[in-house]
Image (cartoon, grey):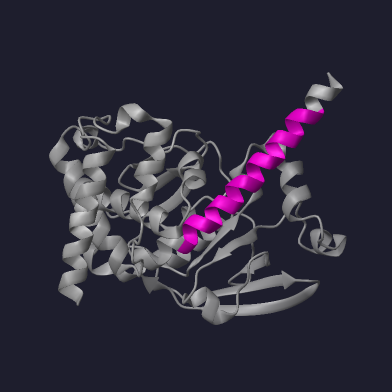
Amino acid sequence: KPIEKKEIILQKKILIKEMAKSSKILHNVSWPILKKNKEHCKSSKSLSYGFIVASADDIPSSEEFLYNEIFNKEIDKYYFNIYETQNFPIVISVAKNSPAEDAGLKENDIILEVNDRRSKNIRALLFENLSQKKFLKLKILRKNKIFVKNMPGVRICSYNVQPLPSAMPNAFADGKKIFITLGAIKLAESLDELAFLVGHELAHNIYHYKSAGSSEAYSHSIKYDDKPKIRELKSILVYSNQEKEIEADIKGVELAYKGGFKLNNVNDYWRRLSVFYPELIENSYFNYRGNAFRASLISKTLKKIKEKND
């Protein structure tokens, strides 16, 4: 049915654009937290440049034309011919005070080459660089002008932070990545609120999964079918008791605060959540107490941190 097919295309476009927008928000929140807490992630083996990309390979091949319409529409056909490709990766977000920003990389830059190699399979090329501690050389296209950008990798906590399509406000960690649902991003009214969610899940990855994390090369910005994975048998037990959740709340506040977020009015998130889910005020899921307990615990922890710093 032509009308239905047209609507499917429209909704897929909205989804991909929303993923890109949410990825930018999460990147700006998470990168300073990951960078300033690097001493807690000594097992992290991958470096960071401080930018994330979108690639046509991130979505089903049948939707490649949507990627081109959204991200490659303004590119002169000359570049597609000379590079013998149907599409180019694009920079979705550049973190503040990152090597990428220092090098002058900007959002919406089209990546033509990675270390003098065509940018096809960009994630594999970036992974090779980040794992071997090399400087990165990018040839980029910006408003029909070509620039070359060079940047070093820097040490951070190497856990990717990505949006997850779901209406339920929630967040997940799986030892490699952190997922924040679109519902949680929409519910949050400040970066401080999102910073706590990132800090909480980062605490799970650091203190409970105790894994080396993943590579920034695989921070997916538009891959809407990427989901948390249970990677080891012991991981199944991570959320099985209240003690770990309480520790993740306390450590999460510390990690987010050290990342530069003052967490003012951060508990408005839980109060807002309780309006939609009154049953969570006193009792939560996963063997954990409710939003009232969580908010009071966060307040106590934050007070102690600020008193110590003062």
Q: Is residue 206 visible?
A: no
The residue furthest left is 243
Question: Residue 207 magenta-drawn?
Answer: no
Q: Does the stretch in magenta take in 7?
A: yes
Can the viewer see residue 169? yes
Compared with 76, 100 (above or below) is below
Question: Compared with residue 183, is residue 51 higher up or lower down, i.e. above or below?
Answer: below
Measuring from the top left, give residue 60's x and y in whole percent. 64, 36
Position in image of residue 137 (x %, y %): 57, 75
Spot the residue most to the top. 1
- Residue range corresponding to the magenta coloring: 6-28
Q: Is residue 277 above or below residue 270?
A: above
- The vertical placement of 281 against 182, above or below, is above
> Would residue 269 appear left or right of 291 to someone viewing this image?
right
Rendering quarter of residue 78: bottom right
Give me the residue at 48% from left, 55% from top.
Answer: 26
The C terminus, quarter of image? bottom left
Q: Chief secondary structure of the magenta span?
A: helix
Q: Is residue 66 left or right of residue 56?
A: right
Measuring from the top left, give residue 285's x and y in whole percent. 27, 29
Q: How many marks?
A: 0
The N terminus, quarter of image: top right
Q: Residue at x 19, y 49 (%)?
A: 297
- Residue at screen point 31% across, 55% down: 199
In the rendered image, which quarter is residue 230 located in? top left
Q: Residue at x 20, y 53 (%)?
A: 250
Relative to the observer, which residue lies in front, 84 or 97?
97
Determine whether, in the image, residue 104 is placed left or right of residue 245.
right
